[in-house]
Image (spheres, rainbow, N blue to C red):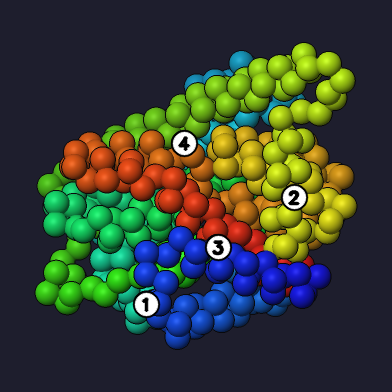
């Protein structure tokens, strides 16, 4: 399977190169260095006692947050659920409010902006990209695909469409810290943490191939400010972030209701076809099976894995994670690990509207630009997930 994994990485990079805006001009050394860093970090996180310690601490931190969230949820919703029942909205989505609250406090205390700037400085040395791209990559991991653009609102009018693609691809390839706790209730925390780290570098790698360009130092600058809470009181910030977290939870809940119902409708339509006994997910599975196989999934599980990967693409990662939980007993640890890593990102069609809408709310012209290259955006972000999943396959 190691050979297949190497093939998966090569194919992923080739798929990126095929749509490159400049097939001869990208930074081989920086891309090679980042792939090497991905391998080293994956080995540390999945195969060493140091990595196990780090993941346990991170998982323990989010477990405590979920416990604190349960206090508030039980006070407001206590008695609604049957005893012993696991209500997805209450146990998985509502804790997002508490994690969002914590992010708001860290923003107000200027701890997060400092972390983002330090990460950005380090990343700029490794990636060979501009300060804006490096800071944005770090901020996307923490703030999420919508919120990160608020910190760039003053720069948006002056950002070229070429740079805007990279910034948007980074946002779509990442996840927000506010929902990481929710992911950890559905996936093994070690794969969630590993995916976040790999996607950070993968976003630079794929964008560097799909969309290579040189940055003029005069237009780059280092005056980006990722602290949007200036001038606000502590309780204003806390209130805003609590409401933002609740909006995210409600939005995810609405998307789940709609998409799961849509899949049920389509599956029912399939059953109306005489002699057909497969579902919509089965069809997607056969289409995506070759991709699942080349990133390291055993062939006898490739159709099931391909179905989960495709479900994430056409709906969202939460729907796919729920489906993974339903069939996890039928999959090997290797397949569960590879698929889990693939699912941890915002790379799906619905994210086009989310990012374009977020940018358009700040600058109409740039929002229209994002919408125009939306399909290429999903394509690139999905390749980031493929690359991360293929690398993880080496260490399971």
Residue that label 1 marks: 25
Residue lying at the far bottom of the rendered structure: 29
Secondary structure under the numbered disc 1 in the rendered image: loop
Q: Is residue 343 left or right of residue 167?
A: right
Q: Nearer the viewer, mark 4 or mark 3?
A: 3
Q: Nearer the viewer, mark 4 or mark 2?
A: 2
Which image quadrant for residue 87?
Answer: top right
Q: Residues within 10 Å of mark 4 (few under 14, many from 20)?
A: some
Q: Nearer the viewer, mark 1 or mark 2?
A: 1
Regarding residue 276, the answer to whether it shows in the image is: yes
Secondary structure under the numbered disc 3 in the rendered image: helix
Q: Residues within 10 Å of mark 1 (few under 14, many from 20)?
A: some
The label number, if any, that marks residue 289 in the structure image: 2
Secondary structure under the numbered disc 4 in the rendered image: helix
The label number, if any, that marks residue 350 in the structure image: 4
| Residue at 27% in and 49% down | 149
Residue that label 3 marks: 15
Say which label, 4 or 3, has the lower sequence index: 3
Say which label, 2 or 3, has the lower sequence index: 3
């Amino acid at each position: 399977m190691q050979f297949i994994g190497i093939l998966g990485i090569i194919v992923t990079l080739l798929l990126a190169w095929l749509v490159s805006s400049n097939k001869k001009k990208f930074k081989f050394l920086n891309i090679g260095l980042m792939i090497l860093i991905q391998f080293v970090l994956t080995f540390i996180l999945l195969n060493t006692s140091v990595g196990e310690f780090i993941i346990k601490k991170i998982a323990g931190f989010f477990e405590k947050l979920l416990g604190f969230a349960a206090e508030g949820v039980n006070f407001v919703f206590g008695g609604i659920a049957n005893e012993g029942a696991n209500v997805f909205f209450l146990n998985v989505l509502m804790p997002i409010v508490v994690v969002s609250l914590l992010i708001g406090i860290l923003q107000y205390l200027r701890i997060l902006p400092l972390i983002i700037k330090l990460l950005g400085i380090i990343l700029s040395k490794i990636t060979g990209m501009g300060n804006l791209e490096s800071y944005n990559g770090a901020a996307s991991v923490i703030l999420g695909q919508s919120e990160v653009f608020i910190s760039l609102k003053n720069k948006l009018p002056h950002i070229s469409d070429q740079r805007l693609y990279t910034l948007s691809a980074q946002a779509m390839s990442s996840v927000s810290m506010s929902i990481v706790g929710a992911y950890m209730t559905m996936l093994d925390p070690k794969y969630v943490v590993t995916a976040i780290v790999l996607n950070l570098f993968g976003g630079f790698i794929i964008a560097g191939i799909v969309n290579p360009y040189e940055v003029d130092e005069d237009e780059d600058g280092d005056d980006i400010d990722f602290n949007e809470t200036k001038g606000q009181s502590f309780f204003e910030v806390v209130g805003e972030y609590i409401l933002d977290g609740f909006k995210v939870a409600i939005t995810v809940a609405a998307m789940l209701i709609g998409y799961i119902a849509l899949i049920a409708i389509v599956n029912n339509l399939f059953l109306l076809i005489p002699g057909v006994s497969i579902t919509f997910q089965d069809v997607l599975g056969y289409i995506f099976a070759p991709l699942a196989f080349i990133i390291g999934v055993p062939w006898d599980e490739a159709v099931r894995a391909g179905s989960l990967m495709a479900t994430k693409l056409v709906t969202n990662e939460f729907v796919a994670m729920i489906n993974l939980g339903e069939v996890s007993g039928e999959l090997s640890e290797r397949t569960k690990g590879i698929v889990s890593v693939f699912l941890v990102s915002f790379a799906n069609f619905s994210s086009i509207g989310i990012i374009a809408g977020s940018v358009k709310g700040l600058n109409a012209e740039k929002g229209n630009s994002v919408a125009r290259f939306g399909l290429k955006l999903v394509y690139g972000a999905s390749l980031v997930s493929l690359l991360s999943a293929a690398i993880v396959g080496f260490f399971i």
